[in-house]
Amino acid sequence: MTFEKAFENVKSKFANSNASGIDDFAVQITLTDSDCGGTLYAAVKNGVLHVEPYDYRDNNAALTISKSALLGFLGKRMSLEAALSDEGSSVYGDATKVEALRKLVSFEKRNYTRKDAKTEKKEATEEKGAGIVKKSTTKKVAPKAKTERKPRATKRTKK
């Protein structure tokens, strides 16, 4: 993965974030991966979050971390201490600003609705036939009727 793709992935985490009412701060993030290493920053200024792929010298905290650990931390799958457990990972400056950055990550609420099999099949056939609804070729099998079982006749043995 290139740094540009890694940056877009990190930036997408903050897509719909609301930074209003948060004091101004800046965190510089340096990715340590060999394939997508680079520096970016996240800064809150006047209630607006900016995430850009540049150095930010006047920062409150500098975070050096791998891409996977950063995404795990931002995705709230691991704590900052766990994310920094990798060799070469560190925080310089105010670690509370890094925690504040995590609070700005937006999670979209997805509304999943469960469709029954008939509705899905009908939609699929409508799409295939350009408006012509085809009949289903699956057969419905009726449950077997219960039959009474007669007791087995036992043979009598002669003594």
Image (cartoon, rainbow, N blue to C red):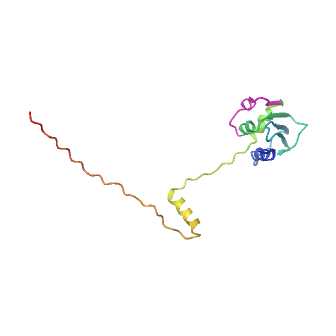
- Answer with left or right where residue 146 lies relative to residue 62: left
Question: x, y percentage for residue 24?
Answer: 85, 39
Question: x, y percentage for residue 88?
Answer: 80, 30
Is residue 93 among what the camera can see?
no
Question: Residue 137, relative to residue 44: is it above or below?
Answer: below
Q: Is residue 107 magenta?
A: no
Which quadrant: the N terminus? Answer: top right
- As drawn, the residue found furthest toward the left would be 159
Q: Nearer the viewer, residue 155 or 142?
A: 155
Question: x, y percentage for residue 91?
Answer: 81, 30
The quarter holding residue 55 reads top right
Question: Residue 28, relative to residue 87: is it above or below?
Answer: below
Question: Residue 12, relative to residue 65: is it above or below?
Answer: below
Q: Nearer the viewer, residue 34 or 11?
A: 34
Q: Residue at 69% of width from left, 48% of height from top? A: 108
Q: In the image, which residues are magenta?
A: 75-91
Q: Residue at 91% of width from left, 37% of height from top? A: 58
Q: Residue at 51% of width from left, 57% of height from top? A: 117
- As drawn, the residue found furthest toward the front would be 158
Q: Is residue 83 magenta?
A: yes
Question: x, y percentage for residue 7?
Answer: 80, 45
Q: Majority secondary structure of the magenta segment?
A: loop
Which quadrant: the C terminus? Answer: top left
- Answer with left or right where residue 105 lies relative to residue 41: left
The quarter holding residue 144 reads bottom left
